């Protein structure tokens, strides 16, 4: 499986699942199916390195998430947005969605989706509006090596730095994509503002454990 990774300062030492905790699928080594995604994340950093890698999924526990409400809740859980639902079946099921997995695969929540996700978490839009926005933006998937076993299955194929001109162009592309994505999502959210459920409604509907 050919994938892409961006690093602000380059990979130093063995690949390991050492991202920050509050990432979409938890701590891991994050990869993308589309090269532009990691490139736009690192283009502000002069020492950034861009990697093309291969991931061998053979023998690994792989969990795939679709662009649906389950994906949104898994992201919410790992970003610490579900604490008010702790003790419910919904919370337990969401927490267990990636439990024991070596690799998680699911839609990317990049800078074009951050605004929409925050609006969902803040109760401004429904789950239907969120998912339709995600589907319309077609951002590709992120593939996350969650365990050391998965990280050991990653092989670096190519590594390169970014020129100043390339970084400047990528910054402009990122800003343009963000504006375009937010505008598209805003239109979709207006069209579907009366459909689906708000985040607090979903959490309140969780069935208490026990």
Image: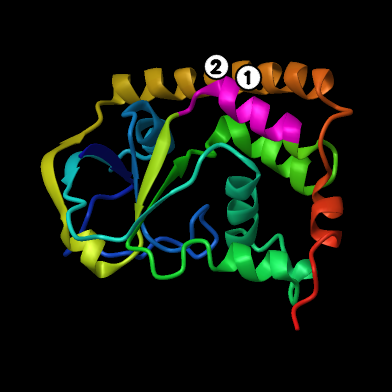
Q: To which residue does mark 1 refer? A: 179
Coordinates of residue 167 in the picture (x, y in percent): 35, 26
Q: Is residue 177 above or below residue 8?
A: above
Query: Would residue 67 be found to the left or right of residue 184 on screen?
Result: left
Q: To which residue does mark 2 refer? A: 176
Is residue 108 shown in magenta?
A: no
Identity of the residue drawn at 16% across and 43% down: 54
Identity of the residue drawn at 56% across and 22% down: 137
Tag on residue 196? Answer: none
How far is mark 2 from mark 1, CA to CA? 5 Å
Q: Quadrant of residue 68?
A: top right
Q: Is residue 36 visible?
A: yes
Q: Please state the extent of the stretch shown in magenta in the rendering.
A: 128-139
Coordinates of residue 183 in the picture (x, y in percent): 70, 17
Q: Quadrant of the N terminus?
A: top left
Q: Quadrant of the C terminus?
A: bottom right
Q: Spot the residue most to the front.
A: 210
Dot 1: what SS? Answer: helix
């Amino acid at each position: 499986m050919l994938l892409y990774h961006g690093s602000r300062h380059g990979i130093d030492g063995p690949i390991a699942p050492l991202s920050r905790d509050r990432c979409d699928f938890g701590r891991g080594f994050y990869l993308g199916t589309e090269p532009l995604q990691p490139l736009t994340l690192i283009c502000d950093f002069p020492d950034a390195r861009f990697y093309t890698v291969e991931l061998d999924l053979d023998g690994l526990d792989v969990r795939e998430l679709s662009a649906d409400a389950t994906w949104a809740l898994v992201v919410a859980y790992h970003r610490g947005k579900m604490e008010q639902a702790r003790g419910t079946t919904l919370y337990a099921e969401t927490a267990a969605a990636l439990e024991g997995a070596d690799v998680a695969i699911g839609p990317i929540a990049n800078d074009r989706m951050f605004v929409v996700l925050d609006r969902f978490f803040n109760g401004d839009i429904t789950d239907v509006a969120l998912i339709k926005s995600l589907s319309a933006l077609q951002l590709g998937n992120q593939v996350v090596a969650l365990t050391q076993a998965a990280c050991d299955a990653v092989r670096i194929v190519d590594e390169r730095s970014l020129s100043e001109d390339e970084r400047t162009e990528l910054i402009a592309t990122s800003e343009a994509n963000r504006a375009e994505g937010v505008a598209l999502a805003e239109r979709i959210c207006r069209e579907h503002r009366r459909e689906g459920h708000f985040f607090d409604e979903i959490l309140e509907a969780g069935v208490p454990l026990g």
